[in-house]
Image: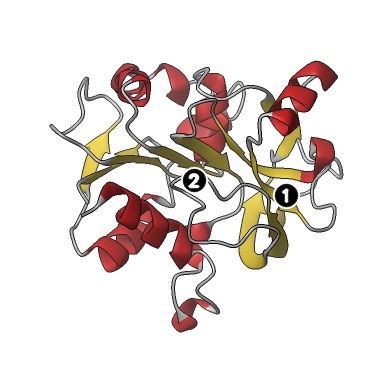
Amino acid sequence: MKAAVLVFPGSNCDRDLAVAIEEVGGTRPAMVWHGETSLPDDVDLVAVPGGFSYGDYLRSGAIAARSPVMRAVVAAAGRGVPVLGVCNGFQVLTEAGLLPGALMRNNGLNFVCRDVSLKVEATRSRFTSGYRPGETINVPVAHHDGNYFADTDTLDRLEGEGRVAFRYAAPVNGSARDIAGLLNDNGNVLGMMPHPERRIGTAHGGSDGRRLFEGLLASIGA
């Protein structure tokens, strides 16, 4: 699997994502600085990591979404290349228009950092094919702006189209309909607040996140 992990000023989970991708796929991903204007040729996966890009100045992900490299990411997504955004990466994807809605401050105005239970809602995407429909998995969260918001019509459409990938099993941050992860209309872009890269083996306290990367690898055929 030929992957690229983006790096923004303030990223702090880029290495975590790179380690997870290399451990599952066997190949070290390219680390692509935000100021680049292109991605590696024939890239199989673009990963947008968590952290605090640009110090969350203005809005979380707002400045990063306008970095030069994001034009190449949007183009790659349009060609069907899988794009995974985790935590701040999810925020960047919404700000870049690759996913609908917005991530707002947690309803308790506190940073939430703990393990959470997620219900797997959609298993037909290449990101979630390694899970069973309705399965509950355990993945950590660490965010201050993870409260997903969209208007009612958008939420109804997302539900009707099966684009809710993961849902919090219990309220975590005030997210509308407890949405924790969301797919685009083609199913090749996934944004999620929980960190699957932090659950890839027993040393991490579990391997529920590993199956996301394994499913991606299997779908790519590498």
Examine the image and state in which quarter residue 107 appears: top right
Place of residue 53 in the rendered image (x, y in percent of width and height, measured from the top left): 47, 35
**Mark sitting earlier along the chain (2/1):** 2
Visible residue check, residue 104: no
Check the image and name the residue furthest to the bottom: 202
Q: Are discs 2 and 1 less than 8 Å apart at CB?
A: no
Figure check: 170 above or below 41: below
| Amino acid at pointer 2 | Gly
| Residue drawn at the location 28% of the way across and 48% of the way down | 220
| Amino acid at pointer 1 | Arg
Visible residue check, residue 140: yes
The quadrant of the image that shows the C terminus is: bottom left
Figure check: 147 above or below 118: above
Q: Which residue is disc 1 drawn over?
A: 167
Place of residue 213 in the rendered image (x, y in percent of width and height, measured from the top left): 39, 58
Figure check: 67 above or below 171: above
Report the colour scheme.
Answer: secondary structure
| Residue drawn at the location 55% of the way across and 79% of the way down | 205
Q: Residues within 10 Å of mark 2 (few under 14, many from 20)?
A: many
Q: Which residue is disc 2 drawn over?
A: 50
